[in-house]
Image: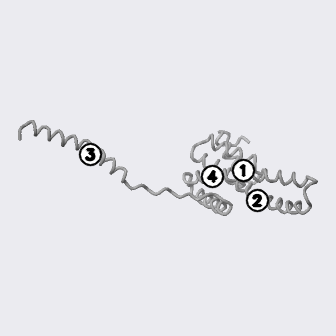
Amino acid sequence: MNKKTITIIAVAILFTITILLPCQISAAEKKSPRSAPVKETALNDSNVQGLVKKIDEQLKKNDFVSTLGPSLKINDFAKDVLASVKTVRAYYEKAMNDAATPQKDKENIILKLQRLEEVEKRYNAIYETSTFNLGYIYAKRGDSERGRKYLSEYIKITPFSMAKDSKWMKAKTLLLELYGLEGEF
């Protein structure tokens, strides 16, 4: 074989390797095992109370990392439920005041309004708890702006209490700390 033939064969081999090698590398990259996506359970009325209790237990252990996401979801969920309750209540009350609504329907609406009131009480408590938890979590994580936002909301929506160990007083005290006003009022 002459030099020219050897050179052509060598160039052909290098060309083939250059073309095939990146394909094999990218194919190997594509075949790498992927981790299974984390299956997240959707919040609903049957599991929200359990999640609230789990978060409370984790917060007692000073877990401010894994509790943030679920607390935000619970807060949004409770807020959405309360907005829906308000909307449905408005329509029910409108139907109750409408002379064209049959008496049988009005009696049915009265029962539904009673159940709606129970749902509202339950979700007000969940919303209050999650709002306090978010303020507490953000404060402990050093995010004072978000901590103040949720703690301010909490003391607005929760009944006042002078008891030193009440959540209202704890929220007020923590809020004042975030403002740098400890002991002022």
Q: Helix, strand, or loop for circle 4?
A: helix
Q: Helix, strand, or loop for circle 3?
A: helix
User: Dot 4: within a 10 Å radius of its alpha carbon, few (fewer than 14), some, or many (20 or more) residues?
Assistant: some
Q: Position of residue 54 (x, y in %)?
A: 61, 61
- For the residues labelled 1 and 2, the Cα–Cα distance comes to 26 Å
Residue lying at the far left in this picture: please name it.
Answer: 1
Three-letter amino acid code at disc 4? Lys
Earlier in the chain: of badge 4 and badge 3, it is: 3
Quarter holding residue 44 = bottom right
- For the residues labelled 2 and 3, the Cα–Cα distance comes to 64 Å
- For the residues labelled 4 and 2, the Cα–Cα distance comes to 18 Å
User: Dot 3: within a 10 Å radius of its alpha carbon, few (fewer than 14), some, or many (20 or more) residues?
Assistant: few
The numbered disc on residue 21 is 3
Earlier in the chain: of badge 2 and badge 3, it is: 3
Judged left or right of residue 65, residue 114 is right
Residue that label 2 marks: 119
Three-letter amino acid code at disc 3? Leu
Residue lying at the far top in this picture: please name it.
Answer: 4
Q: Position of residue 67 (x, y in %)?
A: 58, 54
Quarter containing the C terminus: top right
Earlier in the chain: of badge 3 and badge 1, it is: 3
Q: Position of residue 16 (x, y in %)?
A: 22, 43
Nearer mark to the viewer, of 3 and 1: 3
Nearer mark to the viewer, of 2 and 3: 3
- For the residues labelled 3 and 1, the Cα–Cα distance comes to 68 Å
Q: Helix, strand, or loop for circle 2?
A: helix
Nearer mark to the viewer, of 4 and 3: 3
Please tell me which residue is depicted at 15% across the width and 40% down the height of the picture: 10
Three-letter amino acid code at disc 1? Met
